[in-house]
Image (tube, rainbow, N blue to C red):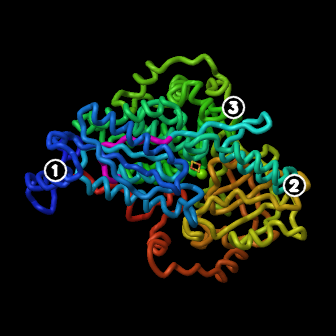
C-alpha cells in the first residue's frame, strides 16, 4: 500500500475484505463529521506530540493546523494521531529510558493505521531519534517537522540560552558568585519563547541530522519556533507528504545509506553537535541495517572542520544560524570543501546538489564559517579507546579546557548518583584539580537509561577556589548543551562488568586526546583480582524496566533494544 495513495482502503485488515474495511472506516469518519467526498483521498497521518508535560512542544497545535492545511490543499486527507511525548526535564529516570518505547509506539502506529504517508512532529531531544527509528523500521514515507528552536532572552546586556546558560548560571550560583535574586532575574530570561533549546544541543543537532538524511524539507531545522516561516514550512511539509503518499516516496529504507550516514556524521562534527547524537545516529542507522562505527566517526571528525559558531562550542544561537542561511548554507560549504556528498536525496525529492545550487547566498561568514577558517581547530567529538574503555568512549573535545587534553591523575570514584550527591559538596573531600573524577553505574543498564549525569559538578571546595574544569569520566551521557573535559559513554559500562567497575580511589588514569587513548594504569593481575570480587546488579523484577535492562545495547551500538534493530522488510501491501 505504502506510497500508492490508496487512502482508507489501504492496509490489509483482519476482515480480509478491502471493500468492507474501507466502508467501515468511512462510516466511522462520517460519524466524526467528515463528508463522504472527503474520504477518497490519500491519507496523511500527522503525529501530534503536544503535551503539557512537554513545554518544548507547546506550538504543536499550530503545527498540526498548518500541516493539515497543506495536506488538504494538496488534495489529501489529514488525520492526526498521538504517541507518547518525551521532554528532557519531565521524564523519570531519564528521557533516554523511554526513547525506545517512543520508537516502538511510533513504529507500531505507523504500521497499524491506514495511512499513505506520515508527518511526525518532534523536537525535544529524544523525540526525533525515536520517531526516525520508528519510521525507518515501519518503512512508511515520512517527513519530520520539528517544533523549532526558542528565541534567546537577555539579562543585563548578556544574551541567555537554554540550557547552556542554565548550567553556567547554576554553577556561578553554586560557587557563591550569584545571589538568589540575581539567579531568579536571569531565570526569567533563559527561555524567551516556546521551542527547543536554542543552542546546538541535542534537539538542534538532531533536527539537522533529520534534514541531512532526507526526512525534513531543506532549511527546516533552524527556523525559530515562533517565526511565521515555521508555519509555512509545516504547510509545505503537508503538501509534500501528499506527493509522497501519491507514490513519489521515498521510503526511509532508501534514504538511509552508507553515504547519507557519513553525511550525518560530517554534519554532526561540523556543527560541533551534541555527543548524544553519536548514540542516536547509531540507533537510527541500525534500523536501516547501516553501520558507522566509532572509528569512522573519529576519522570523519579529524577531517571535518567545525564551522558553526554556536554554543556550547562557539558563541551564538539557532536564530543567528538561521539568519546566516541555516543548515543548507553549512552543507553547501561542506560540499564545496569536499566533506559532504551532495549526490544524496533531500526531503523535497531533489538531490542535495540541486538544493544547494539553488540555496540563496549569504555574505555573512562569521556564524557559518568558511572551511579554511574553522571556529576551533581539531575535532568536535573525539572517540577514545584504551584499557579503561575497550568498547570506546566519547569526548566533546571542542568544548573542553585545552590544558586538560593531555592529563594524568589519581582517580576519585563515585559509585552512583547517590554517592555523588552525598560527597561532592563535602568540604573535607580529598580532591585536587589534578584528580580524575569517575562516576559509574549510570550507563544504559546501570541507571537504567544512561541519564545525562556525566557532567559531574566540580567539587564545591574546588569550585569556590575558581576551578571550572576537571577530567571527568562516566558511563553516562551529558546534555548536548553542556561542556567541559567530560569523557562519556564509557563502554562496556560498569553495570555489565566493564573496566570502569574495577577502578579504585588513587588508581592512575591517563587521558591523551591527541592519541585518542584513555588508560587505567593498573596491572592486569590486580584487575583480575578485582574482577573476581565484582558481582552484577540485580535485574528489575518486571515491566518495561526489565525489558529495558535485558535488551538494551551498549552506547556504541546506539542503546537500541537488540530485538528492534533492522526492519520487518518489505511492507505486505
Ligand atoms: Fe526540550 Fe532542550 S529541553 S529541547
Ligand atoms: Mg538535552
Rounded to the nearest whole Å, what is the CA distance between mark 3 and mark 1?
A: 56 Å
In this rendering, the answer to whether 358 lies above or below 385 is above
At horizontal 38% and vertical 40% (from top left) the residue drawn is 65
Which of discs 3 and 2 lies nearer the camera? The answer is: 2
Q: Which residue is mark 1?
A: 26
At horizontal 51% and vertical 25% (from top left) the residue drawn is 332
Q: Which residues are magenta?
A: 137-147
- Respond yes or no on whether mark 2 lies under 8 Å from ligand 2: no
In this view, the residue in front, 512 or 562, is 562
Which of discs 3 and 1 lies nearer the camera? The answer is: 1
Q: Which residue is mark 2?
A: 176
Instruction: Name the spot of residue 330 as percent of width and height, x first.
Output: 55, 28
Quick check: can you spot residue 257? no
In this view, the residue in front, 460 or 470, is 460
In this view, the residue in front, 145 or 511, is 145
Rounded to the nearest whole Å, what is the CA distance between mark 3 and mark 2?
A: 32 Å
Using a 10 Å C-alpha cutoff, classify the residue at mark 2 as few (fewer than 14 neighbours), some (14 to 19) or many (20 or more): few
Instruction: Name the spot of residue 432 as percent of width and height, x first.
Output: 88, 61
Q: Secondary structure at mark 3?
A: loop
Tell me if residue 125 is in the magenta stretch.
no
Using a 10 Å C-alpha cutoff, classify the residue at mark 3 as few (fewer than 14 neighbours), some (14 to 19) or many (20 or more): many
Instruction: Name the spot of residue 484 as percent of width and height, x first.
Output: 74, 49
Rounded to the nearest whole Å, what is the CA distance between mark 1 and mark 2?
A: 65 Å
Is 234 left or right of 22, judged from the image as shown? right
At horizontal 67% and vertical 24% (from top left) the residue drawn is 366
Is 380 left or right of 123, judged from the image as shown? right
Is 503 left or right of 257, judged from the image as shown? right
Quick check: can you spot residue 559? yes
In this view, the residue in front, 194 or 264, is 194
Q: Which residue is mark 3?
A: 375
Tell me if residue 141 is in the magenta stretch.
yes
Amino acid at each position: 500500500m505504502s506510497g500508492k495513495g490508496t487512502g482508507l482502503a489501504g492496509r490489509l485488515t483482519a476482515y480480509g475484505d478491502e471493500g468492507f474495511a474501507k466502508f467501515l472506516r468511512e462510516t466511522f469518519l462520517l460519524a466524526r463529521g467528515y463528508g463522504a467526498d472527503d474520504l477518497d483521498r490519500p491519507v496523511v497521518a500527522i503525529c501530534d506530540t503536544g503535551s503539557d508535560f512537554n513545554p518544548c512542544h507547546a506550538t504543536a497545535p499550530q503545527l498540526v493546523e498548518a500541516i493539515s492545511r497543506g495536506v488538504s490543499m494538496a488534495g489529501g486527507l489529514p488525520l492526526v494521531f498521538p504517541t507518547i511525548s518525551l521532554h528532557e526535564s519531565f521524564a523519570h529516570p531519564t528521557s533516554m529510558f523511554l526513547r525506545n518505547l517512543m520508537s516502538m509506539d511510533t513504529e507500531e502506529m505507523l504500521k497499524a493505521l491506514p495511512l499513505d504517508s506520515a508527518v511526525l512532529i518532534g523536537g525535544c531531544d529524544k523525540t526525533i531519534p525515536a520517531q526516525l527509528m520508528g519510521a525507518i523500521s515501519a518503512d512508511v514515507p515520512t517527513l519530520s517537522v520539528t517544533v523549532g528552536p526558542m528565541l534567546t532572552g537577555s539579562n543585563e546586556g548578556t544574551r541567555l540560552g537554554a540550557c547552556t546558560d542554565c548550567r553556567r548560571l547554576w554553577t556561578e550560583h553554586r560557587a557563591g558568585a550569584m545571589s538568589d535574586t540575581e539567579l531568579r532575574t536571569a531565570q526569567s530570561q533563559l527561555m524567551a519563547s516556546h521551542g527547543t533549546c536554542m543552542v546546538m544541543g541535542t534537539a538542534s543537532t538532531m533536527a539537522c541530522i533529520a534534514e541531512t538524511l532526507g526526512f525534513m524539507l531543506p532549511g527546516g531545522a533552524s527556523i525559530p519556533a515562533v517565526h511565521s516561516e515555521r508555519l509555512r514550512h509545516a504547510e509545505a511539509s503537508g503538501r509534500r507528504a501528499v506527493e509522497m503518499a501519491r507514490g513519489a516516496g521515498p521510503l526511509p529504507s532508501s534514504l538511509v545509506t552508507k553515504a547519507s550516514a557519513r553525511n550525518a556524521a560530517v554534519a554532526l562534527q561540523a556543527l560541533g553537535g551534541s555527543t548524544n547524537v553519536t548514540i542516536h545516529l547509531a540507533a537510527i542507522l541500525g534500523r536501516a541495517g547501516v553501520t558507522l562505527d566509532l572509528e569512522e566517526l573519529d576519522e570523519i571528525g579529524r577531517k571535518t572542520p567545525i564551522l558553526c559558531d554556536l554554543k556550547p562550542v562557539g558563541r551564538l544561537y539557532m536564530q543567528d544560524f538561521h539568519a546566516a542561511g541555516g543548515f543548507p548554507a553549512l552543507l553547501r560549504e561542506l560540499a564545496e570543501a569536499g566533506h559532504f556528498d551532495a549526490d544524496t536525496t533531500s526531503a523535497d525529492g531533489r538531490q542535495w546538489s540541486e538544493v544547494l545550487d539553488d540555496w540563496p547566498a549569504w555574505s555573512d561568514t562569521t556564524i557559518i564559517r568558511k572551511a579554511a577558517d574553522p571556529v576551533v581547530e581539531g575535532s568536535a567529538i573525539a572517540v577514545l579507546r584504551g584499557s579503561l574503555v575497550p568498547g570506546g568512549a566519547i569526548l566533546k573535545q571542542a568544548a573542553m579546557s585545552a590544558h586538560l587534553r593531555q592529563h594524568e591523575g589519581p582517580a576519585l570514584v563515585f559509585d552512583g548518583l547517590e554517592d555523588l550527591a552525598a560527597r561532592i559538596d563535602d568540604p573535607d573531600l580529598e580532591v585536587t584539580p589534578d584528580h580524575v573524577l569517575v562516576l559509574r553505574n549510570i550507563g544504559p543498564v546501570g541507571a537504567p537509561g544512561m541519564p545525562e549525569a556525566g557532567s559531574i559538578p566540580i567539587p564545591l571546595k574546588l569550585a569556590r577556589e575558581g576551578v571550572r574544569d576537571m577530567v571527568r569520566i562516566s558511563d553516562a551521557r551529558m546534555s548536548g548543551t553542556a561542556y567541559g573535559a567530560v569523557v562519556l559513554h564509557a563502554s562496556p559500562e560498569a553495570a555489565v562488568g566493564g573496566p570502569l567497575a574495577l577502578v579504585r580511589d588513587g588508581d592512575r588514569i591517563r587521558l591523551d586526546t591527541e592519541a585518542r587513548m584513555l588508560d587505567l594504569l593498573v596491572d592486569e593481575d590486580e584487575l583480575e583480582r578485582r574482577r573476581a570480587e565484582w558481582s552484577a546488579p540485580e535485574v528489575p523484577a518486571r515491566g518495561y524496566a526489565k525489558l529495558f535492562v535485558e535488551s538494551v545495547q551498549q552506547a556504541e551500538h546506539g542503546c537500541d533494544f537488540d530485538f528492534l534493530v533492522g526492519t520487518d522488510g518489505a511492507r505486505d501491501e
